[in-house]
Amino acid sequence: MNHRHISAVAITLVAASLISGCMLTSQTQKEKTPTSTKITMSAPANESGNIYARGMSSILSYLGTDFSYDQIMGLSGVAFILQLDTSGPYLPNNELDCAWWPNDDWGFELGLPVLTKATGWEIKKVSSDMEAYKKSPAAEYRRVFQGVIEESLYAGKPVLAYGFIGTATDDKEPPLFGYGTKGISTQYGQQETRIERYPWHLYVIGKKTTVSSATDIDLTSLHHIIALFHEQTQKPATSKTRFSGKQAWGEWLRLLRAGSACDNNMLVHLGYNRRSAVIYLREMTKRYTGETAKHLSSATDI
């Protein structure tokens, strides 16, 4: 892999202009010494944005692996996605909230392989059985998440539950404590609080992995961004109602023309995403020269 390869991929990124709008430095990684199931960490920044990227950035920083919010947005691909789901939910006036608030995490999940390659940490998602969860969230928590959470906290690793940063547990219900957002806000509170409801999925930090070279990470990231645009990132078994790129634009326009889609949340998330996309690509451009830098800069300008 060389600058010519990066440049070729960057040209493709420019062509996929609708999805355009890391700093990857040497990372000092260190394990936390297991002491208890209570973790003391600083609150995430009190700024609006994607709660999964903000939460993951804070967790990684606590673990000694500093990746900014915008880096996580770019590496995960969320900065470049147009995330749309035509299955619901519907608002009271029968408009489809195709980018429901806060945005579902499936777009963030698609970028886990890139995040793992870049951060040097294995990042995994643990999910509940939704039918069992609907019947008894507390029982499903105990069955799926309780042991995983306690093991992670004892190892000194916070967990990310639906954007909520879990730092401790107790014997009350729900048992998870940490930092979260309130209502429709995407800004983290600055005081620890109890999670409002039982989580139905969880992101956990696993073992350390080998960090790839900056060039390899950039190339992998660009390929993922382009794949998102061409709807090539989801598994065949994934719901056919979810779209991440050019088909998402078509579906959104169709819904809007039919008067059956709410666009408020879509516009809010596009604002969050593309703002990070510009920052992410500008930082990537600094690592290259010549035609490669030119093509990346063109993608950023778009």
Image (spheres, grey):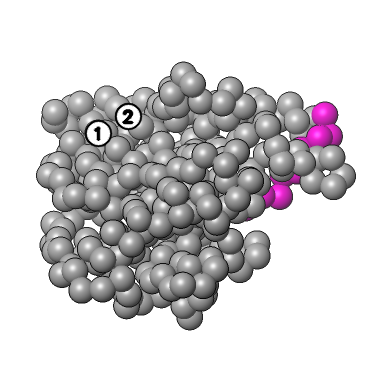
* Residue 58, image x, y percentages: 35, 65
Measured Cα–Cα span from mark 1 to mark 2: 6 Å
Where on the picture, by quarter, is residue 234? top left
Tell me, for residue 219, which label it has, or none. Answer: 1
Q: In what element is the residue under mark 1?
A: helix
Along the viewing direction, whichever of 119 and 69 lies nearer the viewer: 119
Contact between marks 1 and 2 (CB within 8 A): the answer is yes
Query: In the rendered structure, which segment of residues is drawn in magenta?
Result: 258-270
Of residues 3 and 294, the one nearer the viewer is 3
Q: What amino acid type should be assigned to the residue bearing mark 1?
A: Leu
User: Taking 6 as reference, is 67 above or below it?
Assistant: below
Where the N terminus falls, by quadrant?
A: top left
Instruction: Identify the residue shown where x is 48% and y is 62%.
Output: 164
Q: Position of residue 124 (x, y in %)?
A: 33, 45
Q: Which mark is residue 223?
A: 2
- Mark number, residue 31: none
Residue 162 image position (x, y, % from top left): 50, 54
Query: Which residue appears at 67% of the width and 27% of the height?
Result: 251
Whether 72 is drawn above or below 193: the answer is above
> What type is the residue that disc 2 sits on?
His
* Residue 239 can be seen, yes or no: yes
Q: Position of residue 50 (x, y in %)?
A: 50, 55
Q: Is residue 195 visible?
A: no
Are there few (<14), some (14-19), or many (20+) residues within 10 Å of tag 2? some
Q: Residue at x 35, y 55 (%)?
A: 147
Q: Residue at left 58%, top 61%?
A: 197
Residue 264, magenta (yes or no): yes
Q: In this image, 232 relative to 157: left or right?
A: right
Residue 200 is covered by the magenta coloring: no
Position of 128 with respect to 99 (left or right) is left
Q: How many marks?
A: 2
